Amino acid sequence: MEALLHQVLAGLATGGIYASLALALVMIYQATHLVNFAQGEMAMFATYFAWSLINAGMPYWPAFLLTVVFAFVLGVVIERVIIRPVENAPVLAVVVVFIALLVILNSVTGWIFSYTIKTFPSPFPAEPIFGNYITSHGGGAIGVTLVVLLLLYLFFRFTPLGLALRAAAQNPDSARLVGIRVGWMLALGWGLAAAIGGVAGMMVAPIVFLDPNMMGGVLLYAFAAALVGGIDNPAGAVFGGFLVGVLENVLGAFVIGNELKLAVALVLIIGVLVVKPSGFFGKVLVTRV
Amino acid sequence: MSRRQVLLIAIVLLAACALPFVVSSYRTFQLTMALVYSIALLGLNMLTGYNGQISLGHGAFYAIGAYAAAILMEHFGWPYWATIPVAAAVCLVAGFLFGLPALRLEGLYLALATFALAVSLPALLKYHHLEPWTGGVQGIVILKPDPPFGLPIDADQWLYYFTLAVAVLMFVLAWNLLRGRMGRAMVAIRDQHIAAEAMGIHTAMVKSMTFGISAMYTGVAGALGAIAIQFVAPDSFNIFVSIMFLVGIVIGGLASISGAVYGALFIQFVPNIADAISKAAPWAIFGIFLLGFVYLMPTGVAGAVRMAVARLTRKAHNQPKS
């Protein structure tokens, strides 16, 4: 029982990180109905940016904030320059563009920073909290995720810009008619997603260490999380993230062994897609034939 | 096929046969790998180009084919040539089975599911209960086959001819399949799946069968690739193998048989040249080419060649008769 509790709490900690990245995926899905395969690499790139700032002597939190801003700008620029031309293109073209983005970010990072693994600092104290049950970084990561979720909720619920974003995502044509610049709203959505991804990257880097391929597994769990929660529902994605984190840890520790942890994500993704594509909290899509 | 096309193919084949005698044995090995990739790309192109099902996970079937060949040779002492049909059969079944749930997934979601398959594959191959068979992280080392019947060529050259023969067979089969009922059904489903169904095409059957055949092609390529490289290990089958195949079909040309050859030459030789700049350069170049082709030349090299040929011949026809 002790061990189980331990694994559940550790799962919640990693789940927080999956939840942030899943949240980023949901942001882009809501705005454009696309699943961003490059989300992980964008987060990784932002994390390297943070690493260079901290290495240059900047304290953690200013570097954190600056990275969030950098990731936001990166997201906006990518949407404007790379995604925009394929906005109305067939799915295959869009997927190919995402994959191109993935390999470009991955290789450019490797080019600039080399492929050697680097350590990344955690802003939270080293000693565990709650009597050894959870590392303080894990607890901090959960806290950061919840704060991000709260901020997003406040932004979308109570600001005019948030309302405009929601309108642009829900009904682009009508939104355009009332004077919302839908194109820029999409770019804004991408920027927000990239910023959230950057936060996830900085939270996961102290655990998995910094290297250009660090997000591969995390992205997979984030996909699973977003799908489980319903890919169009931000709160669902956060729930999915925690659920996937706990499942991964508990199953990995007691049932299938650590090697098959990634298979949990694979099974979840395929299982959810086949059995209940809308996830737990997603809207059921009905298409007219 | 027109007579000119037949002639052209004959010339290309003759040149392909002569090549191992004029280039070094390392180049011969590279050409062998290009042939291997062309088979894999042909398989992926059937699925993605002709049938419109996006797969980001064909590296998985490539790996299954490679491991099937390696395990049969290592643990059962099979000769290398006998492993190819088995690898084909295993991948046909695996692809068909994966294609069944994939029926319910469209476009983006299929890409997502296959992406997940490709990312988690190395971890599955390292699974310790399979280690007696797969060799775990260490992988399996296999021996290079010697040329049979006392032929006066070295092992690299023999392997090249063997691969060439298999590739020609696979291309002829694919050409036959794609211009027949099955191929038309595949394209019809890609373009208008509701209309296709209304015309009496068994959509589910054709789609999962296409998945199976496509996986079979990639599996054959995997088996040949394992024999050529003489080594299989989990980490050589990461997500980037699948992405490389995607690069190959997009650059070679979607829904085109000859595109598989162009794409294979591209993914085999461009990294070789780019490696001189930086370890990261090949992938940066792959990425930039991917973007460039999607924006500027969605029909790939094959489309560009088609267009160039059409333009040149039209000019020739238009010339006033003297």
Image (cartoon, rainbow, N blue to C red):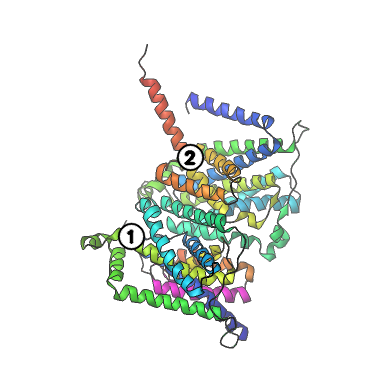
Q: Looking at the image, do the residues carrying marks 1 and 2 touch, with CB atoms under 8 Å apart?
A: no
Do we see residue B186 in this rendering? Answer: no
- From the viewer's perspective, tell me whether residue A80 is left or right of residue B221: left
The quarter of the picture where residue B234 lies is: bottom right
Q: Is residue B66 magenta?
A: no
Do we see residue A284 in this rendering? Answer: yes
How crowded pointer 1 is (Cα within 10 Å; few <14, some 14-19, many 20+) is rated as: few
The quarter of the picture where residue A151 lies is: bottom left
- Name the magenta segment's main secondary structure: helix
Question: Residue A287: which disc?
Answer: 1
Q: Which range of residues does the magenta coloring cover?
A: A229-255
Give coordinates of residue B202: x percent, y percent: 43, 50
In the rendered structure, which amino acid carries the disc numbered 2?
Leu
- From the viewer's perspective, tell me whether residue B9 is left or right of residue B125: left
- Quadrant placement of the N terminus of chain A: bottom right
Question: Residue A33: which disc?
Answer: none
- Quadrant placement of the C terminus of chain A: bottom left
Give coordinates of residue B140: x percent, y percent: 72, 54
Q: Residue furthest right?
A: B150
Q: Are marks 1 and 2 on the same chain?
A: no
Q: Is residue B208 above or below residue A158?
A: above
SS for dot 1 = loop
